[in-house]
Amino acid sequence: MTTDRTILITGVTGNQGGAVAQALQGTGFHLRGLTRTPDGERAAALARHGVSRAPRWPGRSGPARSCR
């Protein structure tokens, strides 16, 4: 199956989000991942497997303490 649809996976470098990304690879969907650590090793590994990084949400550029 091929499609031009995109699926956004939040928390893609975590356990649940990573499992979702793995399960959806090869299904024909374009996968985008949202993570708090877009420059981390897990994000890089997912990018090598075709999961593109979503831009950070405005106002949420770091850990929760930075939003105080």
Image (cartoon, rainbow, N blue to C red):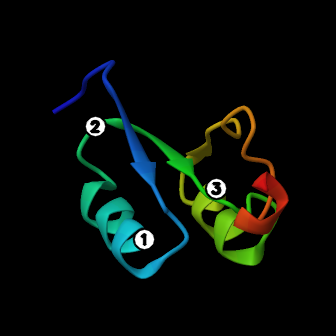
- Residue reaching furthest to the front: 68
- At horizontal 66% and vertical 36% (from top left) the residue drawn is 57
Residue 47, label in figure? 3
- At horizontal 75% and vertical 76% (from top left) the residue drawn is 41
Which label lies toward us, 1 or 2? 1
Q: In this picture, is 28 found above or below 43?
A: above
- At horizontal 26% and vertical 23% (from top left) the residue drawn is 3
Task: Tell me which numbered mark, 1 or 2, is placed earlier along the sequence.
Answer: 1
Q: Position of residue 13 (x, y in %)?
A: 55, 70
Label 1 and label 2: CA atoms lie apart by 17 Å
Q: In this picture, is 36 found above or below 32?
A: below
**In terms of secondary structure, where does tag 2 sit?**
loop
- At horizontal 31% and vertical 36% (from top left) the residue drawn is 29
Does residue 13 appear to the left or right of 3 in the view shown?
A: right
Residue 18, label in figure? 1
**In terms of secondary structure, where does tag 3 sit?**
helix
Task: Tell me which numbered mark, 3 or 1, is placed earlier along the sequence.
Answer: 1
Residue topped by disc 2: 28
Give amino acid for label 1.
Answer: Gly
Give amino acid for label 2.
Answer: Gly
Give amino acid for label 3.
Answer: Ala
User: Dot 2: within a 10 Å radius of its alpha carbon, few (fewer than 14), some, or many (20 or more) residues?
Assistant: few
Label 3 and label 2: CA atoms lie apart by 16 Å
Task: Tell me which numbered mark, 3 or 2, is placed earlier along the sequence.
Answer: 2
